[in-house]
Image: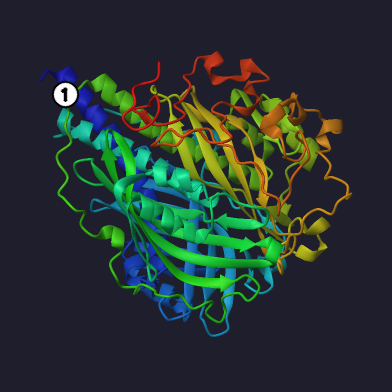
Amino acid sequence: MNAPEQCAIDALARDVARVESLRAVKNLQRSYAQHGQFGRWSAMAALFADDATVRWGDETVTGREAIGAWLAARAGAMNGRAPGSLHTEIIDEPLANLSVDGRTAQVRWMAMRFLGDGRGTARIDGGIYENDYVLEDGHWRIAQLRYHPRFEGDDRDGWTNVDGQDLPVVAKHFTADETGMPIPPAVGDPPRSAATVEDLAARIGRLNDEDAVRNLQNAYGYYVDRRMWSDVVDLFVEDAVVTITGVGEYAGRAGVRHAVETMGPEGLSPGHLNDRPSFDVIVEVLPGGREARSSGIELGLLGDATAREGSWEFSAFHNRFVKEDGLWKLKGTTLTPLLRADYFEGWADGGIALPGRASPDAAPAGDAPLDEPPPDRPHPTPLDLADLTRRLARSQAYDGVENVSSAYGYYLDDFQWDDMAAIFAVDGHKQSPFAGYYVGRDRIIGAAEANWGPTPERRRAISFHWRTQPVIHVSPDGRSANLRTRLFQPRTSIDPAGTPKGFYMGGLHAGMYPNDQAVLEDGVWRLWSVTIDEHYFSSHDWRGGWASAVARPEGEPLPPPSRLLGTYPPDVALTDLGRRQEGFRGGTGTPLQWPAILPMWFHYRNPVSGRVPQRFWPDCVLCERLPEARMTEHGYQQPPAGPERDGVELRGGAGGQPAS
């Protein structure tokens, strides 16, 4: 091998290691959350560096041993171990940045805790983490965990701003440009690597497979939310097994359908809520690249508003996947419900008795050995460094898109309009709710300021925009992507009852960003298009939550569209978009509101079978009305919108051929 070839391999090896490091950092924090659900304080403490520091509000704790003791003491009886106790902390919406030398990292996270001792005490609180991580003896560790409390309360009365005060902006570790560049350009010559081209191909393949499995895991969750059981069954192999701890096992595809139908029949009827957002998901592709597993936390928001019924459900899941015919499929799922509680009663007294609960020290089902040792990953075609670089760019894109997606939520939460607009591409476009689309950064800023006013120094009330559970489809060249995320929306204020119509009451609301897009512009990932469909459910007061919503009385005035239509008209109004905006406030037809069931749109076909959803929209929402807004009109490739291999969409589903 000549010197230039070796140098190219060394550079690629460095780039691969940096992507692996960024993901290891995110998984480290996810492991912290998963251990916390079972009160594994020693395991959590082991994730910290020797001289790590925790800064929790005004408290400071230093050293791994002291941190472990502090975690246990802070939880007390709300430890997730004793019967009826609960310790579920969801930590998500990562915005991660690796250092130039690849040895440290910083990540911002949203967090929310649901706690209870089962003996009359329960607590809910939420805030923001701004954490530092360090590579120590070859392992990533938490160096600084900094938690900034934002709201606190309990399961009976809801929450308010922490200490009953206006909330300052929590300083961000990133600039607008850095959000779209999670891994900065390397500096200097790469170190000599012992990796072969075959080694690097396997590692890049593992990263690509991780993206595909994460997409499958998250798509599965969206189908479950809407009780799209035919699509759920399509995702499984013939000999799949679904396990619900304490309930039973269900074998084969018929068993899969039987298992999911325990949640209700196919489809949602008015008032029925089956939202089961997943958080802190870790995906691991096993050696050989033929099998994988995932684990995470599921928060069940369930009920039937027509019967004034609602419940919470806190669970852990461990799933298995297998690759067949080049496509990933679900091989098995294990759901372990930890606590279920009536919405109106709460979980302070331990909730509703469950048929079975796993021991906190039991090995997760997903960690059990798989049926057969996986074969080595084959390389049927000659390996090409340029093609490996392209394939790596597709996984780098996944992280870049997730980052800029999170940035949108963080800037929106703080009303930082200039920075929010700066994360859009020069020709990007954004929907303002109930009004329409604004094209270009100046118009995006203008709409935000016209609707909400200038950026304040402190906030009396905040509507948080968690953008979670991403399904990201990246183009073959790694320069463009379609993105779907969930809007998980806690709101807080000093005086929830004193806000207009309870807008900022301490409760939960839900929407969907089903048709977002992002592009790599001048080396930085930026948003190309953002669409929000909302609200799929809402809580007008804490006491009744989503379970007390009532249908709009006949003859009651319809909710008005946005005032922007008069004060700062959009470039494309929602009323210009026909069927795509039917049922949404400010759109076409009669607007629907919870407990009515809003239409649900998808940018992709079923990732295994290729089944086309009832409402399928693979491009940006305003592109049909404004064709020049398409990514493809600006030199970008259209990402795949269904089953795909290496960014190339397949006809039909499994076993299909590349689409022409």
Q: Is residue 362 left or right of residue 160?
A: left
- The residue singled out by tag 1 in the image is 6
Q: 607 and 10: which one is in front?
A: 607
Residue placed farthest to the left in the image? 1
Quarter where residue 395 is shown = top left
Residue at the extreme bottom: 119
Q: Mark 1 Cα within 10 Å, few/some/many (few <14, many 20+)?
A: some
Q: Nearer the viewer, residue 606 or 460?
A: 606
Note whether residue 611 is visible: yes
The x, y position of residue 428, in whole percent, is 61, 25
Q: Position of residue 356 (x, y in %)?
A: 39, 75
**Disc 1 element:** helix
Q: Is residue 303 above or below residue 170?
A: below
- The residue shown at (32%, 27%) is 391
Query: Which quadrant does the N terminus fall into?
Result: top left
Q: State the count of labels.
A: 1
Rendered residue at 46%/75% (across/down) = 354
Q: What residue type is disc 1 on?
A: Gln
Where on the picture, by quarter, is residue 505?
bottom right
- Residue, x 67% and y 18% (percent of image)? 626
Query: Is 159 placed left or right of 29 in the picture?
Result: right
Is residue 495 visible in the rendered image? The answer is no
Q: Is residue 83 above or below residue 274?
A: below
Where is residue 46 drawn, in percent x and y? 31, 65
In this orientation, which residue lies closer to the viewer: 586 or 92?
586
Q: Is residue 199 left or right of residue 538?
A: left
**Front-most of 556 and 528?**
556
| The quadrant where residue 653 appears | top left
Residue 458 position, x and y percent, is: 71, 53
Q: Is residue 272 left or right of residue 201?
A: right
* Location of the C terminus (image quadrant): top left
Vertical arrangement, residue 518 with respect to residue 295, above or below: above
